[in-house]
Image (spheres, helix red, strand yellow):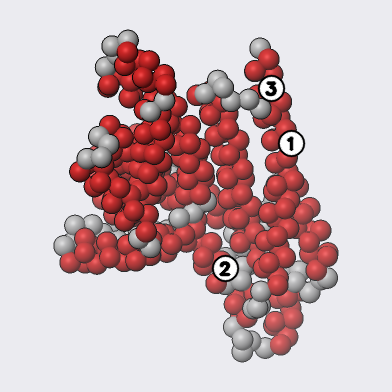
C-alpha cells in the first residue's frame, strides 16, 4: 500500500511538472527561431516582392508587433490548445498538419522499433547465453557496425542497392500515387488495410514501408543488442543465478524467467525513449527516403521559416517525449518492486 502511494505521488509530481517542461520547450523554440537569420516573408513572397506587399503580409501575420507581444500571443494560443496556422500553407492549421502527417511517422516508428527489438533482443540473448564464443563475437561486431553507421549514408546505400539496382522496393512515398490509399480510423495504411481485410492494399502499403523501416530498424537494433547482452551477462553472474543452478534449474529457465526480467529494466527505459524520439520524427530517415511524415514536414517548415508550424510540431514532439518518460518510469516500477520513488 505504501509503495502504491509513493508511486502515485511520484507520477503526480511528474504530471504537475509537465506544464513547466512544455513552457520551457515552447519558449526556447520561440526565441531560437527569431534569433536565427532569415525572414519568413522572404520565404513566402520571395526577396523581390514589392515593399507594400511585404509590409501588408507582415502586418497580416502579426510579425510587425514587438517580440514580447508576439510571445504573449503565442503563449495565449498554447493555453487555449491552439497551435496556430501555418504560414507556408495558408488556411491550414498546425493541428491539421499534425493530424495529416503524424500517422506516417507513427507507422514508420512502430515498424522500425518492432524490427529493432526483434533483432536486438534475439542477438543479445544469443550472445549472453554463449559467452566467449563466435556467436558473441559476431553479435558484438553487428552491434558496433549498426551503431556506427550514419543514418543518411545507410539510407542512401539501401535505396541504391535494393530500390534502384535490384528493384525490390519502391521509394519516395507511402503508397502508389495512382491508387487511393486505404482509409481508416488510425491513418496507418497497413493496419487500416488489414482492418478492412484488403490484403492487396496491405501488401502494397507494407512494400512501401519495408525499406525505410528495415533500414532504421537495423540501425537501432545494435543499441538494443548491446544493452541486452551487457545487462543479461551481468544478471547471469549474480548470486541468485548460482543459487538457481544449485537447485537444478535449467539454463533456459534461469535465462528467460529470472535473469532476463532484471536485465529488461534498462531495455524498457531505452525502448520508451526510443519510441518517443521516433514518434518525434526520425528526421534523417524521413528526409532521405522522402517519407511523407511529420519530421519531413518539420524540415520543410524550417526551410520556409514557418514559425507557427515549427513551434507547434516541436511542442507536440515535446509532449510525446515527456509523457513517454513518465510511462517508462511507471513500467519500470511494475517490473522491479525494488524501485522506490
Q: Give the mark, 1 or 2, whose residue is nearer the N terminus.
A: 1
Give the label on residue 16, or none: 1
Nearest the eye: 175 or 114: 114
Cα distance between the residues tagged 1 and 2: 31 Å
Question: Residue 241: which quarter of the image?
Answer: top left
Image quarter hosting the N terminus: top right
Give the label on residue 151, or none: none
Question: Residue lying farthest top?
Answer: 247
Give the label on residue 6, or none: 3
Q: Secondary structure at mark 2?
A: helix
Nearest the eye: 75 or 220: 220
Nearer mark to the viewer, of 3 and 1: 3
Question: Residue 83: which quarter of the image?
Answer: bottom right
Across and down, in percent, residue 106 comes to 45, 46
Q: Give the mark, 3 or 1, whose residue is nearer the N terminus.
A: 3
Q: In the rendered image, which residue does mark 2 sit on?
A: 302
Cα distance between the residues tagged 3 and 1: 15 Å
Across and down, in percent, residue 136 comes to 26, 42
Amino acid at each position: 500500500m505504501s509503495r502504491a502511494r509513493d508511486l502515485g505521488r511520484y507520477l503526480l509530481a511528474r504530471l504537475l511538472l509537465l506544464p513547466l517542461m512544455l513552457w520551457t520547450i515552447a519558449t526556447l523554440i520561440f526565441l531560437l527561431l527569431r534569433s536565427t537569420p532569415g525572414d519568413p516573408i522572404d520565404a513566402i513572397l520571395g526577396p523581390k516582392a514589392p515593399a507594400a506587399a511585404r509590409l501588408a503580409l507582415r502586418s497580416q501575420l502579426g510579425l510587425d508587433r514587438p517580440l514580447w507581444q508576439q510571445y504573449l500571443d503565442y503563449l495565449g494560443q498554447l493555453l487555449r490548445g491552439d497551435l496556430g496556422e501555418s504560414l507556408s500553407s495558408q488556411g491550414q492549421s498546425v493541428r491539421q498538419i499534425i493530424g495529416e502527417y503524424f500517422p506516417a511517422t507513427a507507422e514508420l516508428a512502430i515498424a522500425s522499433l518492432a524490427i529493432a527489438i526483434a533483432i536486438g533482443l534475439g542477438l543479445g540473448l544469443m550472445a549472453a547465453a554463449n559467452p566467449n564464443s563466435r556467436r558473441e563475437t559476431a553479435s558484438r561486431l553487428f552491434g558496433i557496425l549498426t551503431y556506427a553507421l550514419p543514418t543518411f549514408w545507410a539510407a542512401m546505400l539501401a535505396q541504391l542497392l535494393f530500390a534502384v539496382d535490384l528493384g525490390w522496393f519502391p521509394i519516395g512515398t507511402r503508397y502508389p500515387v495512382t491508387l487511393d490509399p486505404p482509409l481508416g480510423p488510425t491513418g496507418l495504411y497497413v493496419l487500416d488495410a488489414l482492418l478492412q481485410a484488403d490484403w492487396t492494399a496491405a501488401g502494397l502499403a507494407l512494400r512501401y514501408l519495408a525499406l525505410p523501416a528495415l533500414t532504421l530498424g537495423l540501425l537501432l537494433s545494435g543499441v538494443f543488442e548491446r544493452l541486452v547482452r551487457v545487462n543479461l551477462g551481468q544478471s547471469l553472474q549474480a548470486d541468485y543465478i548460482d543459487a538457481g543452478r544449485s537447485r537444478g534449474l535449467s539454463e533456459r529457465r534461469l535465462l528467460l524467467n529470472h535473469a532476463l526480467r532484471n536485465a529488461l529494466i534498462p531495455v524498457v527505459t531505452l525502448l520508451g525513449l526510443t519510441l518517443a524520439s521516433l514518434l518525434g520524427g526520425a528526421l534523417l530517415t524521413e528526409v532521405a527516403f522522402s517519407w511523407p511524415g511529420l519530421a519531413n514536414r518539420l524540415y520543410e517548415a524550417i526551410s520556409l521559416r514557418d514559425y507557427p508550424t515549427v513551434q507547434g510540431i516541436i511542442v507536440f514532439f515535446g509532449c510525446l517525449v515527456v509523457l513517454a518518460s513518465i510511462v517508462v518510469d511507471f513500467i519500470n516500477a511494475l517490473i522491479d518492486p525494488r524501485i522506490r520513488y
